[in-house]
Image (cartoon, helix red, strand yellow):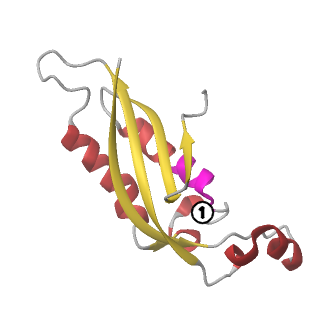
Amino acid sequence: MVYLTRKAEFAASHYYHNPDFSPEENQRLFGKCNNPNGHGHNYTLEVTVKGEVDPRSGFVVDLKQLKEVMHREVLDAMDHRFLNKEVPEFFNKIPTTENLAIAIWQRLELKLQKAKLHRVRVYETQDLFVDFYGEND
C-alpha cells in the first residue's frame, strides 16, 4: 500500500455561532470567533490517498485527476468564501476546522477513481490542524 498526499491552500472566512445558544453562551463558548462579521484564515489542505501502484503508469493515482477533483470540489467552492453564508454544508453547521475536514472528506470521497481517500488534514493555522480518516476509522 502506497500513500500519496497533495497539498493546496485556500482562504475563507467564517464565524462560530449556535442559534440554540443565548448570545451570552455563544460569546462565552466562542469568544471573538462569534463576531457575525466573521474572520478569515489561510487554510492549508492535505489530501492523502492510498492504493496499489499501477504497474503500467507507476502511479497510485492520476495526479492531474486528483488536482482537478480537489479544485472542483473544495477550492472552487470554498476559496475566498464566507463559509457560513456561501457553502451549503455550513448554512446550519458551525464551520469549525473539525467540521471543515469532514465536509471536505464528504465532497472528495466518492469523486476519486482507483485510489481510496485515506486522510484529510486541514490546517487552520501553522500550529492547529485536524485530521479526518472517514466515518469508519
Q: Residues within 10 Å of mark 1 (few under 14, many from 20)?
A: some
Magenta span:
95-103
Image position of 99 (left or right of 25): left
Toward the viewer: 128 or 78? 128
Q: Is residue 97 magenta?
A: yes
Q: Residue at x 62, y 66 (%)?
A: 91
Identify whether 6 is placed above or below 43: above
Q: Is residue 84 magenta?
A: no
Q: Which part of the image, by quadrant, shows the C terminus?
A: top right
Q: Residue furthest front?
A: 127
Tag 1, which secondary structure? helix
Q: Position of residue 77 (x, y in %)?
A: 40, 62
Report how many numbered discs are placed on residues in the image.
1
Q: Residue furthest bottom?
A: 37
Image position of 66 (left or right of 24): left
Q: Which residue is mark 1?
A: 90
Q: Residue at x 49, y 51 (%)?
A: 122
Identify whether 126 is placed above or below 30: above
The part of the image, by quadrant, that contains residue 108 is top left
- The type of residue carrying mark 1 is Phe
Q: Position of residue 113 (x, y in %)?
A: 30, 31
Q: Position of residue 48 (x, y in %)?
A: 39, 36
Q: Position of residue 79 (x, y in %)?
A: 39, 67
Q: Residue at x 67, y 60 (%)?
A: 93
Q: Which part of the image, by quadrant, shows the N terminus?
A: top left
Tell me the chief SS of the magenta region.
Answer: helix
Q: Residue at x 54, y 34 (%)?
A: 133
Identify whether 53 is placed above or below 29: above
